[in-house]
Amino acid sequence: MSSQDVLREWALYCAAMGWHVFPLVSASKRPAVRGWEARATIDRDRIARCWGSGAFNIGLATGPSRLLVVDCDTAKQPGEVDGATALTRLADERGVELPATYTVATPSGGRHLYFTLPPGVRLRNTAGQLAPRIDTRSGGGYVVAPGSVLAEGGYELADDTDPAPLPGWLLQVLCERPAPATSSAGVGPVARPSAYAASALRGECDEVRSAPPGRHNEVLSRAAYRVGRLVGGGLLDAEHARAELTHAAHALVSAECGCTPAEVTRVIAAGLAKGRTQPRSLPSRSDAEVAA
């Protein structure tokens, strides 16, 4: 069976699990289509046609799939605690055990733990909210599905247990708002961004994911600056904006271009900080709609 056939079978397998999928660039974590969350599907005919046309990696849109995926990363520095250990410690502190659940091993040695969301619950992506080296993906996010392959290795199924319901204690922690970082602009947390600000953030994140080789830093810096202006204007929560940009920039980290997580973090921080010095307000049309 060819690699293209294998990827198609994995995409169909995900759809059979009720998980909405979309194509990623071959041997990459970068979406191959714009508007990927809206276009993610469980339709077997669409999937067969798409993966019949190329050896695409598989993106799994966590929001439509009603999943919360805990992304436990490996330690990057000597003495640093890896994400899986940190998550176990969080459970130990609460006197509970992590349930067995669907788990995917990543090429870097990390783990993706899949959990189902309770009915009516909507969660956003987080970066480091549970603990350092732990991100989560839900509404507005995606993970690379099992069967996908990067230059450094594949995403392999480590535990095929059906996804467990999201533990109540994890849901509680994820619903807690982290203390807002102190800023010179004095911008506090935003409880709910306007439709305009949320749409603008999604658009900038899509631009980052689609950044062409050789322009990764340029596109990421520009997006972070624009988003920073919205944060400075009190239209977006700073930590939410940082988490979304960081997740979008995961698609840029690859052996081919030399982008690293540390460089991505630096570029995002610099862009957000610069943007916050030039705060942006809502367009007049949106103001009028709100007033109405």
Image (tube, grey):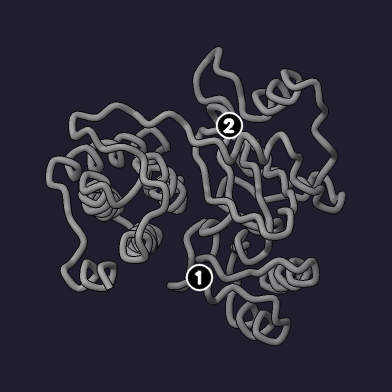
User: Depth check: 41 or 263 in front?
Assistant: 41
In the displayed structure image, the side of residue 255 where residue 215 appears, left or right: left
User: Depth check: 74 or 180 in front?
Assistant: 180
User: x and y percent of residue 146 in the render?
Assistant: 70, 56
In the displayed structure image, the side of residue 191 where residue 112 appears, left or right: right
* Residue that protrudes farthest toward the top in the picture: 79
Residue 63 versus residue 177 in the image, above or below: below
State the residue position of label 1: 36
State the residue position of label 2: 130
Residue 238 versus residue 150 in the image, above or below: above
Residue 212 visible somewhere in the drawing: no
The amino acid type, in three-letter code, at marker 1 is Trp
User: x and y percent of residue 10 in the render?
Assistant: 74, 66
Judge the density around disc 1: few (<14), some (14-19), many (≥20) Cα neighbours within 10 Å.
many
Q: Are marks 2 and 1 in contact (CB under 8 Å)?
A: no
User: Depth check: 152 or 141 in front?
Assistant: 141
Find numbered disc 1 in the image and state the secondary structure of the residue it sits on.
helix
Judge the density around disc 2: few (<14), some (14-19), many (≥20) Cα neighbours within 10 Å.
many
The amino acid type, in three-letter code, at marker 2 is Leu
Using the image, tell me which numbered label, if any, was put on residue 59: none
What residue is rendered at 36% in x and 40% in y?
189
Residue 291 visible somewhere in the drawing: yes
What residue is rendered at 53% in x and 65% in y?
24
Residue 95 versus residue 12 in the image, above or below: above
